[in-house]
């Protein structure tokens, strides 16, 4: 098979603190011998476990990039045993454009794994990460939030897996992250996800949804910062005590959790995120955006739970996601 054209400007097995780039040659109209430069930091001290921490898998989600930029300048090499590989902006073309998908090839990175060494830009990045970085890792943390069109209660999540020992390890890591909400997820459409690739390599994997609406808040970034520190302690890389605050356990059992818009218009939420809702309760109504005098279309919860995610911003299209009702365990 073709060799992946990405190369690292720093050695991945070096000791100490190194900041560099994964460089992907990308010949194009505005730069004939240009490159996609993906920032990477490797911090290593002696023998020990490796953590891989990634942000901006989707380019418009900001808690990961902020918290991982902060980690890359604040983590002291003498405080760790093992190695931390930090990619704050793994999908650099999308991050630079402030978009979910890559403007270079239109691809959604989290549906493009395991990628190809001879594919378009997004697939090359996925292939490099899957074949060169994930195999080095014992534990992987991939940050997500809602991006420009969704907003979430801050939760860490682990997946229901066929290998129950691996599932237990992932759930323990997710609980160590200790977000205000902790979710056990059955992924409905997992083909091509980074999550699925990492889990298929037998690694411990934690993901998050920490906010959204195209920005990050002081609160959501604090959740990310604490989660990183806790996870590094849990993995045995950083010394100290995991800081455990109260967390609400959520379950997302099936499709009834999700509500989608069957009409377009102006969305009015009747409950806010974190509010308790009952099966059959109206959670939102959609007003006509182009005329007066018509009753709104009403959207209902499919089961008992709490409103865990919602659409953003104010106008909604047919087929858009309206709300996620998760079950409190
Ligand atoms: Zn995402």
Image: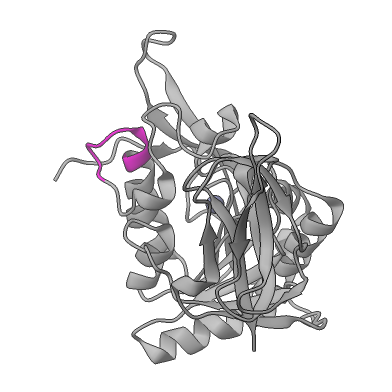
Task: Between residue 217 and residue 235, name the one nearer to us.
Answer: 217
Image quadrant in which you'd find residue 31: top left
> Picture coordinates of residue 268 (x, y %)?
73, 50
- Pick the quarter of the image with the C terminus: bottom right
User: Left or right: 127 with respect to 52?
Assistant: left
Q: Quadrant of residue 134?
A: bottom left
Quick check: 27 above or below 203? above
Q: Nearer the viewer, residue 275 or 128?
A: 275
Residue 215 can be seen, yes or no: yes
Which stretch did the figure color magenta?
Answer: 116-123
Q: Nearer the viewer, residue 226 or 315?
A: 315
Please say whether residue 122 is one of the residues in the magenta stretch. Answer: yes
At horizontal 45% and vertical 33% (from top left) the residue drawn is 102
Q: Nearer the viewer, residue 81 or 276?
A: 276
Residue 300 in the image, given as x and y percentages of width and height: 60, 66
Relative placement, left or right, of 22 versus 118 is right
150 within the magenta span: no
Residue 257 at x, y percent in the picture: 53, 71
Side of 167 where 306 appears, left or right: right
Q: Is residue 285 above or below residue 313?
A: below
Kindly give the residue lying farthest to the right in the view shown.
Answer: 218
Q: Position of residue 29 (x, y in %)?
A: 38, 8
Q: Is residue 48 visible?
A: no
Quarter of the figure with residue 206: bottom right
Residue at 54% in and 53% down? 321
Magenta span dominant secondary structure: loop
* Rendered position, 168 above or below 189: below
Residue drawn at point x = 44 percent, y = 8 percent: 30
């Amino acid at each position: 098979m073709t060799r992946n054209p990405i190369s690292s400007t720093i050695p991945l097995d070096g000791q100490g603190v190194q900041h560099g780039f994964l460089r992907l040659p990308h010949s194009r109209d505005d730069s004939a011998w240009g490159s996609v430069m993906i920032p990477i930091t490797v911090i290593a001290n002696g023998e020990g476990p490796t953590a891989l921490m990634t942000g901006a898998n989707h380019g418009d989600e900001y808690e990961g990039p902020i918290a991982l930029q902060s980690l890359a300048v604040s983590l002291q090499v003498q405080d760790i045993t093992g190695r931390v590989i930090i990619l704050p902006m793994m999908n650099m073309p999308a991050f630079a454009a402030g978009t979910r998908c890559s403007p270079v090839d239109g691809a959604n990175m989290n549906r493009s794994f395991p990628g190809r060494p001879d594919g378009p830009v997004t697939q090359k990045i996925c292939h490099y990460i899957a074949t060169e970085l994930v195999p080095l890792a014992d534990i992987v943390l991939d940050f997500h939030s809602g991006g420009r069109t969704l907003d979430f209660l801050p939760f860490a999540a682990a997946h229901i897996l066929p290998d129950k020992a691996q599932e237990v390890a992932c759930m323990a890591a997710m609980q160590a992250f200790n977000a205000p909400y902790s979710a056990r997820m059955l992924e409905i459409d997992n083909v091509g996800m980074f999550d699925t690739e990492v889990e298929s390599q037998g690694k411990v994997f934690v993901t998050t949804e920490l906010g959204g609406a195209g920005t990050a808040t002081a609160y959501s970034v604090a959740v990310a910062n604490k989660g990183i520190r806790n996870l590094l302690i849990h993995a045995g890389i950083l010394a100290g005590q995991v800081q455990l605050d109260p967390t609400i356990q959520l379950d997302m059992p099936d499709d009834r959790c999700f509500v989608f818009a069957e009409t377009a218009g102006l969305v009015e939420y009747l409950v806010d995120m974190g509010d308790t809702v009952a099966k059959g309760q109206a959670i939102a109504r959609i007003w006509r955006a182009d005329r007066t005098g018509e009753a709104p279309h009403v959207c209902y919860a499919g089961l008992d739970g709490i409103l865990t995610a919602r659409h953003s911003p104010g106008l909604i299209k047919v087929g858009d996601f309206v709300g996620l009702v998760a079950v409190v365990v």
